[in-house]
Image (tube, rainbow, N blue to C red):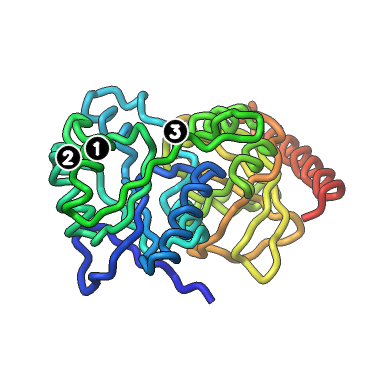
Amino acid sequence: MNTAPTLYRHLPRRHCTAPSALTIGNFDGVHLGHQAILERVHEQAAEYGLLPTVMTFAPHPRAYFARVSGKPGLAPPQISTLRDKTARLAACGMQQIVILRFDQALAHMSAEDFILKLLISGLNTRWLLVGEDFRFGHKRSGDVALLKRMAPELGLTVETLTDVTEPSGKRISSSTLRTVLATGQVAEATRLLGAAPRISGHVVHGRKLGRRIGFPTLNLRVPEPCAMRRGIYVVRVLGLGPEPLAGVASLGVRPTVDDDGPLLLETHILDASPDAYGTLVCIELLHFLRDETTFSNLASLGAAIGNDVQGARLYFASHGL
């Protein structure tokens, strides 16, 4: 039985000196390309008696540089929340997950210190897998050539990986996945992820307007910027019992009732009204129904939700839960 991975937010590790097989990246979405990389790490770790390990960053380095440059709009939309990314990395067999805060100190760390302090002293890395274009350290001064130059004296084996492609030759990338999600192509996103897109979180209290119009909802806060198209989805709800529950959900800012609200995922469960406040749930997006719309009044909103519920019932009647 697989044990839960050890999560590190700082290096070096405390009370652990076991050698690691490591890969480094943002792994947003943990799509099929990422999964191929993680499978290679797992294989090599098993062969050489190492701990399969992944190092990633929060926030995304591009989001950090977008913020410090005063251009937050350049931050890449997030495919996965940090919770969901960590869960997917664990499902791929990673026994150590390192989530380093990408801040000024890390951005200004020299390439040599990145290798010595994080990879060697921090994780006792003995085998490393990175992309051929991997860059690291202050002003991206470090590259694969530097890694391979320093590797022999450090007892480190460095392996590089070309792009992971589909049988057609098309590269599998997070940028492609973001485009697919932004256009509501849920089936294609599911294919690229190997699983349905998901948003997990603890159910929070809302304004309970859904309850007033006959459609109570479970509300999850969604970090921005979110890669998923705003609108109405057919969904599957996990975490409220032994079996998944059918639902319909709105991802958006509730323009009918709140001009400047936070981004929320509001899920109405079909044929059930569980008391779920504070519960950790996972909402899997199965099918995009329509865009977010502003209605003139709550009665019109309720009628639209009724149509959405009917659309969800038709989907489940055809596809099952």
Which labelled disc corresponds to residue 184? Answer: none
**Is tag 3's residue or tag 2's residue first in the polypeptide sequence?**
3
Q: Is residue 23 visible?
A: yes
Above or below, 296 against 11 in this view is above
**Is tag 1's residue or tag 2's residue first in the polypeptide sequence?**
2
Task: Classify mark 1: helix, strand or loop.
Answer: loop
The N terminus - image quarter = bottom right
Where's residue 235, x and y in %? 68, 48
Name which residue lies at 59% across and 44% down: 193
Depth check: give the residue in front, 202 or 86: 86
Going by the image, does 167 lie left or right of 32?
right
**Is tag 3's residue or tag 1's residue first in the polypeptide sequence?**
3
Q: Which residue does the numbered mark 3 point to in the structure image?
A: 77
Depth check: give the residue in front, 88 or 131: 131
Where's residue 254, x and y in %? 55, 36
Name which residue lies at 32% across and 36% down: 134
Q: Are marks 1 and 2 in contact (CB under 8 Å)?
A: yes
Q: Is residue 210 visible?
A: no
Q: Which residue does the numbered mark 2 point to in the structure image?
A: 111
Name which residue lies at 25% across and 48% down: 101
Where's residue 158, x and y in %? 32, 47
Where's residue 76, x and y in %? 41, 31
Q: CA distance from mark 3 to mark 1?
A: 22 Å
Q: Amino acid at mark 1?
A: Phe
Task: Classify mark 3: helix, strand or loop.
Answer: loop
Q: Are marks 3 and 1 in contact (CB under 8 Å)?
A: no
Q: Amino acid at mark 2?
A: Ala
Kindly indicate the quadrant of the structure image that contains residue 300.
Answer: top right
Mark 3, Cα crowd under 10 Å, few <14 / some 14-19 / many 20+, is many
Q: Amino acid at mark 3?
A: Pro
Going by the image, does 96 lie left or right of 231?
left
Q: Which residue does the numbered mark 1 point to in the structure image?
A: 136
